[in-house]
Image (cartoon, rainbow, N blue to C red):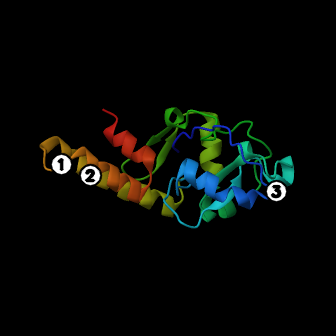
Amino acid sequence: MRPLSRTPNGNNYKTYQSYRSDLLQRYGPYCAYCEKKDNDLDIEHVEPKSKSGKITDWNNLLLACPTCNRDFKKAFNASRMGYVFPDKDETFKVFHYRANGTIAALTQAAVKTKKLCGLDRSGATSNRADAYSRAFELKQKVISGTRKPVDVLSWAQSMGHWSVWVSIFHD
């Protein structure tokens, strides 16, 4: 789960759907939770709108793939308390990414978030494993001089899974 920089948004819209282009511009076409690149992202209420009333609050909106948002997270968390969210927490410090696509959650809040969003579901793990494999392969080619670092950026942007790429290229 890549950390997201939450900066103020000067726009105040009447519907949360109106924030789509602002969210895409700010965070790109990637799920805030599983990091999959997706052109059909939901506008996700971190604190469920049914429980918080924060329906058009910029600070409560992220982009999420339909699987993370509708199939797993739904409205199971009443608030942010006890969870890790990418726009408020240093998520890269509490999640570690493995070659098989699974995620190690290092704190209790990270464990709860991993379960809440279904981050170890089979589709997410296979996508991360593919990104991990590609990132590892490209790192070897960059080290050997047969690829340039700029090639890494284009692959990472096209595949998504920023945290996997940073895990592989951290040094």
Quadrant in which the C terminus is drawn: top left
Mark 1 or mark 2: name the one nearer the start of the chain: 1
Image coords of residue 52 (percent x, y): 84, 47
Label 2 element class: helix
Image coords of residue 123 (percent x, y): 49, 64
User: Alpha-carbon distance for marks 2 and 3?
Assistant: 41 Å
Q: Nearer the viewer, residue 21 or 78?
A: 21
Label 3 element class: loop
**Label 2 neighbour load within 10 Å: few <14, some 14-19, many 20+:** few
**Residue located beneath label 1 in the image:** 141
Q: Which mark is residue 159?
A: none
Mark 2 or mark 3: name the one nearer the start of the chain: 3
Residue found at x 56% / y 52%:
25
Residues at discs 1 and 2 in contact (Cβ within 8 Å): yes
Amino acid carrying mark 1 in the image: Lys
**Residue located beneath label 3 in the image:** 14
Residue found at x 85% / y 55%:
50
User: Alpha-carbon distance for marks 3 and 1?
Assistant: 49 Å
Amino acid carrying mark 3 in the image: Lys
Residue found at x 80% / y 46%:
78
Does residue 31 sit above or below 7 in this rendering?
A: below
Left or right, 169 with respect to 94, comes to left
